């Protein structure tokens, strides 16, 4: 494959945009080489600026669960755009999307739309603090909740890929209110709660983590968190930016059978346009401005383009709940195929999968938290990533990310992916 034009475009971009990208993981720093510049995409396929056609496993990092340029979404956006793109005034479609989201997700009465997952999580924490009157939060190493200050403490995703899980620019004052625990370590959380009695407003967690690869919560851990929060008057925030409307209509809360106090969304809820949201039961949401004193706002929040994309996307998912099973089946098929090739060739690996999220780790030990994820061999990962890319498969360019399958992927595409691994497996030895 040739990446001549991508290479030229990247050089030019670097002159005007820091690192040539508007979000760090796109720069391929973890894997080296030239980032692929996309020209267009349809269904499961990307076409890059050099004319290469690639099978896509990131789907814009999750939002495009039904594939690229999904027609009902595109048409809804086009029709809406003709009538104006933003008013800064209330519109009916905001209520339509809110009503649908509230009907799909358990344990929420009201939802507020914002413009990104970052905003959603930042606002959820402010709301939790305002509601409980307490300052501290607990987050888990390797979980990523966006780039707002409170979360850039042992963050996952791009933050860890770039070696700055604790970003310069976050003040000591902010950092001291974010306490850190290890994923799947309930005793560690209990110890933090005991040491900070009546000071913790919220525990925020990716209920299935996707920012240190895909990591699955053990049952006693996630249940234990719920019980601990209830007992101690701490709000449990499920960051469902990745899992919301991806794992099931009701997201991780539904699949795990655990009720969160505040839920955050992003990605799928915007159908590929910039949307985030946070939601809770009435009693908590009543604290939010203009009903209550906790301030939160946005010029473009709830804009008609974003709302129309979200509404078309959630309507499609709501009308076809089998989609989640179909996606999980495809992901299982991929899991088995990749596993067989790696096993048959004696490559040490772990594959983690939950629903339509999956990640491959080149390590012998189970990947259950950030430390075990970080044990993965990054040199092998680089060879894997570039080998797959040469064979037309676009994977997340970092071992600390989950793949997001989209329903436009066919079993032939999955077979082609497994075949690609067969083609390059010798290089991984
Ligand atoms: N939370 C989680 C779990 C995420 O995966 C992300 C982004 N990948 C965010 C929050 C932040 O979302 P955004 O990039 O839209 O700000």
Image (tube, rainbow, N blue to C red):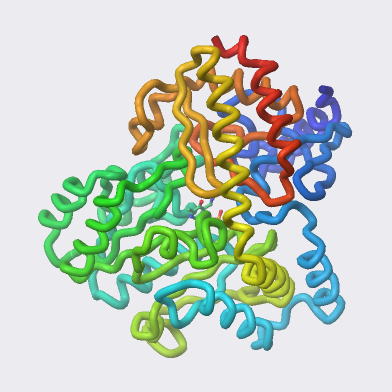
Direction from residue 335 to residue 410 in the image, left or right: right
Compared across the picture, whether 216 is left or right of 331 comes to left
Residue 157 in sight: yes
Where residue 85 appears, x then y in whole percent? 77, 75
Residue under the point 60% across and 65% down: 321
Q: Looking at the image, which is closer to me, 329 or 35? A: 329
Locate residue 323, reporting x and y percent.
Answer: 63, 58
Can you give x and y, in whole percent of width and height, for residue 76 in the image? Answer: 79, 72
Which residue sits at x=64%, y=39%? 26
Residue at image position (72%, 74%) is 308
Q: Position of residue 150 (x, y in %)?
A: 37, 55
Residue 327 lies left or right of residue 161; in this view the side is right
Q: Is residue 413 above or below residue 144?
A: above
The total number of labels drawn is 0
Q: Nearer the viewer, residue 408 or 159?
A: 408
Quarter location, residue 204: bottom left
410 relative to 361, above or below: below
Quadrant in the rendering for residue 420: top right
Is residue 23 at least partly visible in the picture? no
Q: Nearer the viewer, residue 370 or 326?
A: 326
Quadrant of the frame with the C terminus: top right
Name the quarter where the N terminus is drawn: top right
Instruction: Name the quadrant containing residue 194.
Output: bottom left
213 with respect to 48 (left or right): left
The answer to whether residue 65 is above or below residue 181 is: below
Q: Is residue 222 above or below residue 346?
A: below
Residue beneath the point at 66% across and 27% down: 418
């Amino acid at each position: 494959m040739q990446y001549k034009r991508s290479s030229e475009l990247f050089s030019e971009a670097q002159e005007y945009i820091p690192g040539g990208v508007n979000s760090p993981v796109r720069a391929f720093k973890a894997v080296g080489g030239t980032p692929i510049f996309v020209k267009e995409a349809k269904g499961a396929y990307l076409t890059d600026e050099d004319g290469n056609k690639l099978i896509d496993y990131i789907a814009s990092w999750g939002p495009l669960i039904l594939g690229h340029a999904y027609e009902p979404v595109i048409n809804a956006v086009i029709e809406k755009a003709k009538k104006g793109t933003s008013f800064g005034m209330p519109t009916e479609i905001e209520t339509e999307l809110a009503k649908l989201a509230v009907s799909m997700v358990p344990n929420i009465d009201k939802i507020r739309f914002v413009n990104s997952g970052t905003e959603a999580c930042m606002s959820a924490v402010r709301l939790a603090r305002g509601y409980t009157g307490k300052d501290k939060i607990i987050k888990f190493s390797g979980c990523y909740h966006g780039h707002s200050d409170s979360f850039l403490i042992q963050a996952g995703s791009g933050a860890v890929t770039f070696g700055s899980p604790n970003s310069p620019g976050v003040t000591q004052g902010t950092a001291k209110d974010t306490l850190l625990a290890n994923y799947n370590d309930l005793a560690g959380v209990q110890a933090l709660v005991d040491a900070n009695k009546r000071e913790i407003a919220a525990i925020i967690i990716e209920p299935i983590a996707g920012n240190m690869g895909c990591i699955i919560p053990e049952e006693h851990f996630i249940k234990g968190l719920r019980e601990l929060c209830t007992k101690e008057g701490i709000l449990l925030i499920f960051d469902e930016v990745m899992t919301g409307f991806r794992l099931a209509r009701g997201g991780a809360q539904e699949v795990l059978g655990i009720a969160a106090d505040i839920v955050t969304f992003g990605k799928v809820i915007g159908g590929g346009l910039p949307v985030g949201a946070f939601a809770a039961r009435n009693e908590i949401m009543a604290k939010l401005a203009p009903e209550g004193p906790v301030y939160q706002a946005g010029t473009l929040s709830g804009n008609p383009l974003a709302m129309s994309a979200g509404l078309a996307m959630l309507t499609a998912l709501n009308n076809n709940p089998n989609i989640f099973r179909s996606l999980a089946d495809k992901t299982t098929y991929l899991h088995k195929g990749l596993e067989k090739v790696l096993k048959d060739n004696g490559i040490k690996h772990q594959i983690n999968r939950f629903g339509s999220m999956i990640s491959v780790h080149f390590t012998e030990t189970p990947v259950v938290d950030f430390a075990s994820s970080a044990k993965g061999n990054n040199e092998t990962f680089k060879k894997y990533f570039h080998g797959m890319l040469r064979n037309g498969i676009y994977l997340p360019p970092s071992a600390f990310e989950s793949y997001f399958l989209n329903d436009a992927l066919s079993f032939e595409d999955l077979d082609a992916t497994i075949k690609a691994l067969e083609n390059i497996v010798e290089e991984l030895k």
